Image: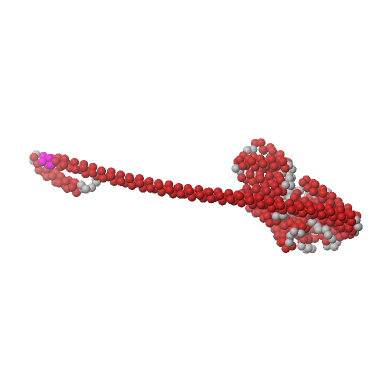
Amino acid sequence: MTFKHPLFILLFIFLSLLTAGQIPNQTRQKTVDSLFVLLPDAAGTDKVNILNQLALQLAPRSFDSSFQYATEALSMSEQLDYAIGKGIATFNLGNSYYFNADIKNALTNYLSALRILEPYEPSKDIGNLLIQLGAVNQYVRNTGKMTAYYKRAASNYAAIGDSVATISAYWTLAFSYFYESQTLDRLNTFPSENLIIMMDSTLKYNGMVLEYIIRHPDSNWMPDLYNFQGLCYQAKKDPSALDYFLKSLEACSKFVDTNTRNIMEGLEHMNLGYYYYITDDPEMGYSHSLLAVNLLKKTDRYDLLAAALFTLGEIDTDRGHYQRAGKYLRQAINLSDTFLINIGQISHSDPVIRIWGITQIRSWRIDGFRDLVRLHELIGDYRQALNYQKKMEEEKKLQSQDELSRQIIGLEANYADELKRQEIAGLVRDNELRRLKLNQTRILFTGIGGAVLIALLIVIISIQRKRFGSDRKALLLEQKLLRSQMNPHFLFNALYSIQNFIVTEKPDKASIYLSKFARLVRNILDNSTEEF
């Protein structure tokens, strides 16, 4: 038994429910039409916001249109000094590249948008941006940054009170740990102890989601929760996985949408088929896998149908039904080709499938070619076995090149971002130093100016005091001079009047006035030294 079941196959299904905090995967034409109606009369920041919404909505369908509106929004934001508009426009430029499968430019613009929007945390837009950063960092195998971005997104949603988006971010984090652990295990590039840590993290965050759903029941989430819990236990070789798969299958009947129900039921039968297959019940494994194929044929999920056919081919090979096994395996390979060609048109509410799906299907193709090699060796057709061996090696080479290019993209983007952050930090430091120097200069000149002003005030006060002293002295001299001029004249007049009373024989009046005159003279003499 050589086939490795893709335990992380559910990831593409689960994420269809986790759109509360992510960019739209499909263009909503009604929304676009309403935005076009508003655009001609809009101005200023309102127009920037409408252009950004158009860029966001058109990104899944038209790179050129989305890029055009995002660029226009960016230009207007710079003219208006509208930082939030500029950040979201840069985010939308990243989305344009993202849907055009240009991960390098997508990551570069996402990082630039984050630098602009960071001062405005928390917000829904920043949470959405962080979810995308987590997704592309997972694509470039930067697990540390991936988890940090998802956790930060959850914190943004929690801070603004969006509990659904918060739990969705944690669920995405749980799936990402699981997906990453399984992918890296297949690539044999991760120590086993690290895989155990990642699985523990998966169970931790999935437990948080389970607690939330118990408090806020939602039947649409239950199939996915049970399914994921089953896969986690299956990865740990815990037999309770079967109970969760059966619960998930039962919960699928509540889906109203036929396509969604077929996908989910097909997935559950595929997981049950593999579970019975690895627990030595090939008959039940084959029966459930066949049910999965029949259900998935009614959907556009070629990747899931291919996985179910790979399982059927593996089981039939082990059971000795070589002709039928070869048919299933070749059908699976052809469907994987179809999936790679049409991945951009697949109906799915989560855009991450477009970048994760390629790695997923290539891993299955490698297993499928390996199964075909084994099959043709068993029937003695070594020419065909060699042919499929070459195809398997070519697929491995493509996978290795893809892994290397992803890591290079991540390293280049992170290096450029670090340089930009250092440049910005240097500019901030320079501005701070210039500000401090300017403040010091201002303080110095203010101090000198104050000292000069105080000195001038002292001089003015001193001069005024001297002037006041001189004026006062002059006044005193003038008073004394006046008194010295007035006293003789007054004395003679007073004496003449008293003399007149004596001559006219009025001794009583003469005596009274003489007494008053004597008292007046005494007062004058006593107060001659006073100013007044």
Magenta range: 494-500
Front-most of residues 404 and 150: 404
Tell me if residue 219 can be seen: no
Q: Main secondary structure of the magenta part?
A: helix
Q: Does the magenta portion include 131?
A: no
Q: Quadrant of the N terminus?
A: bottom right
Q: Quadrant of the C terminus?
A: top left
Front-most of residues 483 and 510: 483
Percent x, y of residue 259:
80, 49
Front-most of residues 224 and 23: 23
What residue sits 87% from the left and 55% below the top?
386
What residue sits 15% from the left and 45% below the top?
517
The image quadrant that residue 50 belongs to is top right
Instruction: Work out whether 99 lies above or below 214.
Output: above
Residue 245 falls left or right of residue 378: left
Residue 139 falls left or right of residue 462: right
The image quadrant that residue 51 belongs to is top right
Percent x, y of residue 281:
85, 61
Front-most of residues 149 and 494: 149
Percent x, y of residue 261:
80, 51
Tell me if residue 180 can be seen: yes
Q: Does the magenta portion include 499?
A: yes
Residue 309 falls left or right of residue 355: right
What residue sits 72% from the left and 55% below the top?
141
Percent x, y of residue 114:
64, 49
